[in-house]
Image: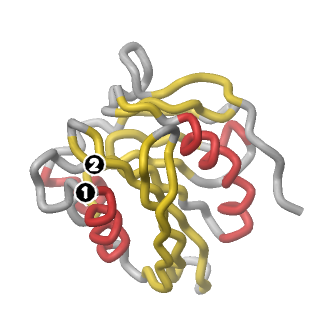
Amino acid sequence: GAPGAAVAAASLGGPGTACPLPVSFSLAQAWEPKAVRNPEDPEFAVLTRQGPATVRCEVDAKPAGHIGFLRVWTAEKGSASSSARALLEAFVKAEKGSSGAAYRETTAGALPAVEVAYTVRSELLDEEKEERAFAVATPKGAVVVHLGGMDTEEHRAMVPAYELARTTLKVL
């Protein structure tokens, strides 16, 4: 069966939280946020950039008993990808091995959002695995919240934490 709703334990994104972001949202219990250090460093671009987006924050599911991360990515305001849909499409396209992307209009908190579900071929496991993300446009640029996971089973077990982030999102 599907896992139940996640319990909100803390907020992420605002001043005084682990990651200053243009948005805030609730974190599931035991999930551990960490700001990405020097995301602009060109030496690490292969790890910190995906298409037009730069990773700002990683929320580790390990303390909650899962293998995966909720990652928050941003794109500069005024870039070609400052619309949520354009950013999300470029983001998915830039992920190696991604396919089968299905986009839908949704909401994140009270904001209009675009969500995508897609699969990525895992070289390590030699299988397809599910991933999903949503994007919103803010006055400071677009934001993507992405949920990966070691495999599809882990991914599905973490969806409640992703949904908690999506439904509690606010622009700061």
Q: Is residue 123 visible?
A: no
Q: Which residue is mark 1?
A: 83
> Could you tell me residue 147's position as x and y percent?
54, 56
Q: Nearer the viewer, mark 1 or mark 2?
A: 1
Whether residue 71 sits left or right of residue 96 in the image: it is right
| Residue pictured at 10% horizontal, 50% vertical | 78
> Could you tell me residue 93's position as x and y percent?
32, 76
- Closer-to-camera residue (164/51): 164
In the figure, residue 37 lies in which quadrant? top left
Q: Earlier in the sequence, mark 1 or mark 2?
A: 1
Q: Quadrant of the N terminus?
A: bottom right
Whether residue 167 sits left or right of residue 53 in the image: it is right
> Could you tell me residue 126's position as x and y percent?
59, 86
- Closer-to-camera residue (109/101): 109
Q: Which residue is mark 2?
A: 142
> Could you tell me residue 102's position as x and y percent?
50, 77
How many numbered marks, from 0 up?
2
Is mark 1 in CB contact (under 8 Å) with mark 2? yes
What coloring was used for the rendering?
A: secondary structure
| Residue pictured at 68% horizontal, 37% vertical | 63
Q: Is residue 72 visible?
A: yes
